[in-house]
Amino acid sequence: MKVNRSFRTDSKRLVAFICLTILLLILQTAIFSNLFAGQYVPQLMAIVIMFLAFYWRTTGGLIFCWLLGLLLDFQIAVLLGPSMIASIMIFFIFSTIANNLYINSQFVLVLSGAVGAFLLIFIQQIIQNIFIDVGLSNLLALMKDALATALIAPLIFPLLSRWFLTSSKI
């Protein structure tokens, strides 16, 4: 018997998810950046985007990822668009491969967290570098953020799953 898990889209859960996402964004930008002095900052928005890609593979999930990218662009305050494009690309990549992954595996969550965070930052910097010569940050800094995200992803995914997913037996 297969268990199908899907995102709850009732209004109370959506409002709670939006509030939690804003809280995670504040946690990432205000607390973690200052606490870790800009190094080893976990990309919590990449984890939220991957969660949506794994469990809410509809137009609603895509629009929500686009809005997350818009919030990240406002947070970066350099150029409007790179984070939106990066979040949509990550959503498409992970929603495409979601059927072929065993998402409940800790290894898959760690690997997905590392790859998702690396891609999010790398794509943002590539697009920003097209319009503004900000230079690419070194690969080691990208790997540090990806490592921090990979270590936090297995902790956040079960919490998000417990709060925002429904199970149905097929």
Image (tube, rainbow, N blue to C red):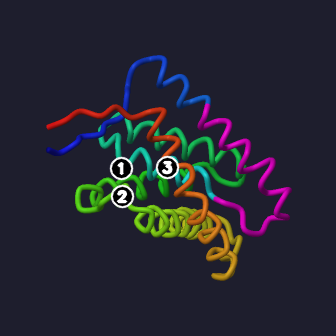
Q: Amino acid at mark 2?
A: Phe
Residue under label 2, please give it.
94
Q: Secondary structure at mark 3?
A: helix
Sequence-earlier tag: 1 or 3: 1
Which residues are drawn in magenta? 20-42
Furthest residue to the top? 11
Q: How far is mark 3 from mark 2, CA to CA?
A: 14 Å
| Marks 1/3: CA–CA distance | 11 Å
Q: Is residue 14 above or below residue 57?
A: above
Left or right placement of residue 131 versus residue 54 in this view: right
> According to the image, label 1 marks what residue?
54
Task: Name the foreground residue: 142 vs 16.
Answer: 16
Q: Are marks 1 and 3 in contact (CB under 8 Å)?
A: no
Q: Residues within 10 Å of mark 3 (few under 14, many from 20)?
A: some
Q: Magenta segment, principal secondary structure?
A: helix
32 inside magenta stretch: yes
Percent of width and height locating residue 59: 32, 36
Looking at the rendered image, the quarter that the C terminus falls into is top left
Q: Disc 1, disc 2: CB below 8 Å?
A: yes
Judge whether 145 appears above or below 96 on screen: below
Instruction: Give the x, y percent position of residue 97.
Output: 28, 61
**Which residue, given by chain and number where applicable, does mark 3 sit on?**
157
The image quarter containing residue 153 is bottom right
Identify the mark nearer the N-term, 1 or 2.
Answer: 1
Closer to the eye: label 3 or 2: 3
3 and 50: which is toward the camera: 3
Q: For residue 55: magenta?
A: no
Dot 2 surroundings within 10 Å: few (below 14), some, or many (20 or more)? many
Amino acid carrying mark 3 in the image: Phe
Q: Secondary structure at mark 1?
A: helix
